[in-house]
Image (spheres, helix red, strand yellow):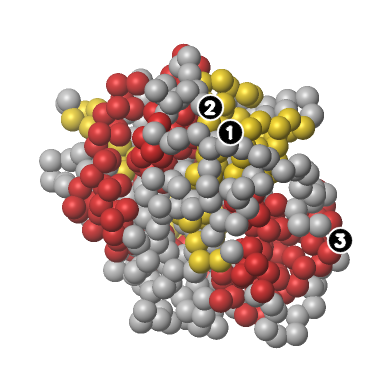
Amino acid sequence: MVTHPLIIAGAGIAGLWTALHAAPRPVVLLTGGRLGEGASTAWAQGGVAAALGGDDAPALHAEDTIAAGAGLVDEDAARLLAEAGPREIEDLFALGAPFEKAGGAWALSREAAHSRARVARVKGDQAGAGILAALIRAVKAAPHIDIREGWRAETLLRDANGGCAGVLARDADGGLQRIEASDTVLATGSLGGLYAVTTTPWTSQGQALAMAAELGAVIRDPEFVQFHPTAIDIGRDPAPLATEALRGEGATLIDAKGRRFMKSVHADAELAPRDVVARAVHRQIKRGEGALLDARAAVGEAFPDRFPAVFAAAMSGGIDPRRAPIPVAPAAHYHMGGIATDLDGFTGVPGLWAVGECACTGVHGANRLASNSLLDGLVFGRRAAQALREAAPRPLEPLEPSAPPVLPAPALQRLRQVMALDAGVERDAAGLSRLLAAIDQLEERYGPAPALIAARFVAAGALKRTESRGGHFRSDFPARSERAVSTRLTLDDARAVTVPTPAKAEFAE
Ligand code: SIN
């Protein structure tokens, strides 16, 4: 039996599922807030995609995943994901996640770019919260898991013999603590918080990418950030989401004059792939024509029961979605790129693993299919746990760590604005050059803070990719290249990407 402990940093769906399945191996679970806080899982609305319907099959789910990913999906990963989907739902249901059923069968929603209704949901738009509550109960009851609430991984311990020897963590009282372990799993989620408009917790700033890259890990496809087309535009940070399931129910996108605009953009109109809808909404707003989600006919009076989270968010902004369309805008929502791993979550750096949104197996390619994200955390979390159960201990010789520099709040806010402007739904060389120059300037002043390292990867990947594909649209290179090639960058590679055109950081604090 393997008895040496492992560390898991992050307590969203991927971290918790990995922790549960790593038993009997002892786990030290670090979570920056209280369990359930600060994880984007809690805010997931749509649900979990899985081939559960009578008319569906894992092969069809894999096909849709591959098609959505615009030529960059790792097909083995997509097949694994789709085949494992139904079992993951059954197991979560058995654990107490209250997925809806209708007449004994799973109640399934249809979302964009899915050829079937296959999204298992919880009380309309409560999937993330319902699943997370069940996982937290299970984790709290699991004797092999030592939960450290309020503990945040700051940096990884570099081993004298190469690889990772654990983490330097900030504890709940603000002290720095070294925790040594043969295996460390990063599960800290998104980088949406690097953007001024995001649907993820703003504290999610790509910390895992920075920590892993500093230890030599490769970052794959960092330029592929998914923008959700229908964040509710009521000036809140983070922006509340209006789930795509609303469009699956028949809600339409209209301009300020009430005209539907998606019909002229794509044959699937509101159910076109997410990147297509996000660009259309972005352009509507840029042209000053407005973008609103009209669910009055499709949902109407049933709103409070069927979509309670969207209803509450809209009402908090003074909009009653039963009577009025909801103003929407695209928001950074999901990172398809991340720390390159194999299909068991191993990064190639001895002792370092990554699961969930901060990892990149290639399963989402250039554009994630709706509601595949929670499934990714489950399937690849379980696989990592299986591999970790068998991982042999390594002799550890950690070098002295130091905590990373901190980016002061005003500088972070400026970075978020520049990211939204220059590495957003539409990018070009001039904007990306401005962004890189701004990152250089901030790094000179404050040092290589994790947010700056993560932002640098996005900017460098986006500048190098001189084509448009999936979530990455270059207005100066609008066509898709014939060959689809993944970006793979080390930190040195990212630093070597320099501003191609003279760009001065228009960046005053
Ligand atoms: C949504 O409910 O629209 C978001 C689901 C997802 O990001 O997969």
Please state if 385 lies on the left or on the right of 335 as rendered: left
The x, y position of residue 36, in whole percent, is 55, 28
Residue at the spot of label 2: 5
Helix, strand or loop for disc 2: loop
Of the residues shown, which amino acid type is indicated by label 1? Ala
Q: Quadrant of residue 493?
A: bottom right
**Front-lying residue, 116 or 81:** 81
Residue at the spot of label 3: 445
The x, y position of residue 19, in whole percent, is 46, 29
The quarter of the picture where the C terminus appears is bottom right
The x, y position of residue 274, in whole percent, is 41, 59
Helix, strand or loop for disc 1: loop
Q: Are marks 1 and 2 in contact (CB under 8 Å)?
A: yes
User: Which label is found at residue 215?
Assistant: none
Q: Which of marks 3 and 2 is in front?
A: 2
Helix, strand or loop for disc 3: helix
Please state if 257 lies on the left or on the right of 266 as rendered: right
**Front-lying residue, 153 or 64:** 153
Other residues around mark 1 within 10 Å, as few (<14) / some (14–19) / many (≥20) = many
On screen, residue 422 above or below 161: below
User: Which label is found at residue 181?
Assistant: 1
On screen, residue 276 above or below 137: below
C-alpha gap between disc 1 and disc 3 = 34 Å
What residue is at 54 percent from the left and 60 percent from the top?
Answer: 219
Of the residues shown, which amino acid type is indicated by label 3? Arg
Of the residues shown, which amino acid type is indicated by label 2? Pro
Q: Earlier in the sequence, mark 3 or mark 2?
A: 2
On screen, residue 160 above or below 484: above
